[in-house]
Image (tube, grey):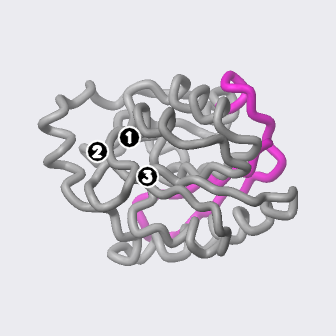
Amino acid sequence: MIKRLRPKYTEKELRQIYAKPHDHTNWHDHLIRVDVTIQIAKWMTTYGVNSVADLSCGNAAIANSLEIADTYLGDFAPGYYYCGPIETTVNLIPNVDLFICSETLEHVDDPLEVLKAIRKKTKYLVLSTPEAAFNDTNPEHYWAWDSDGIKELLEGAGFEAVVFNSLKINDYTYDYQIWGCR
């Protein structure tokens, strides 16, 4: 299931919301989610990854943990060479072996088009997103989906899942789904 939660924000509103890069260490549940995402990303590098991009990287913990020389970092918030909406910055990077899309897809207006643009730029994808947060009150999130909904989007963009992890943390707002795709 895929559910639209709220309408698109204006560019001005987005600049206020994303004034600085996200730091996952500010949220306890994000610590384990980032660690699990890193492990899946490291496993995906066994496919022969020599370049990586993360254009919604926040503090870049996931991409930097891979220690890959050809790493392209960006964020909507200022502070990186690739700065602005992922819908724009994805077209500015060279093709890469691995693209990281962590806790991003629920923030974009057209997730399928973003995944299609990413597909044109990469062989492999690591994606994490909340699981079935259909009553999500986070004003930054445009979308909610369950794992069937994300699988549908991934396949619609031309990705095939090779690994999937569902991370459930009791007493926290979100459960997470983490995907590795080719």
What's under tag 3, amino acid-wise? Answer: Ser
Question: Label 2: which residue?
Answer: 140
Residue 110 drawn at (x, y percent): 44, 25
Mark number, residue 85: none
Crowd around label 3: few <14 · some 14–19 · many ≥20 (10 Å)? many
Pointer 3 with pointer 1, Cβ within 8 A:
yes
Q: Earlier in the sequence, mark 3 or mark 2?
A: 3
Residue 9 against residue 93 in the figure, above or below: above
What's under tag 2, amino acid-wise? Answer: Glu
Residue 24 drawn at (x, y percent): 40, 70
Residue shown at the point (14%, 48%) measured from the top left: 16
What's under tag 1, amino acid-wise? Answer: His
Q: Dividing the picture into quarters, in which one does residue 47 lie?
A: bottom right
Q: CA distance from mark 3 to mark 1?
A: 10 Å
- Residue 48 versus residue 1: which sits nearer the camera? 48
Residue shown at the point (38%, 27%) measured from the top left: 109
Q: CA distance from mark 3 to mark 2?
A: 14 Å
Q: Dividing the picture into quarters, in which one does residue 27 lie?
A: bottom left
Question: Label 1: which residue?
Answer: 107
Range of magenta residues:
154-182
> Marks 3 and 2: which is nearer the front?
3
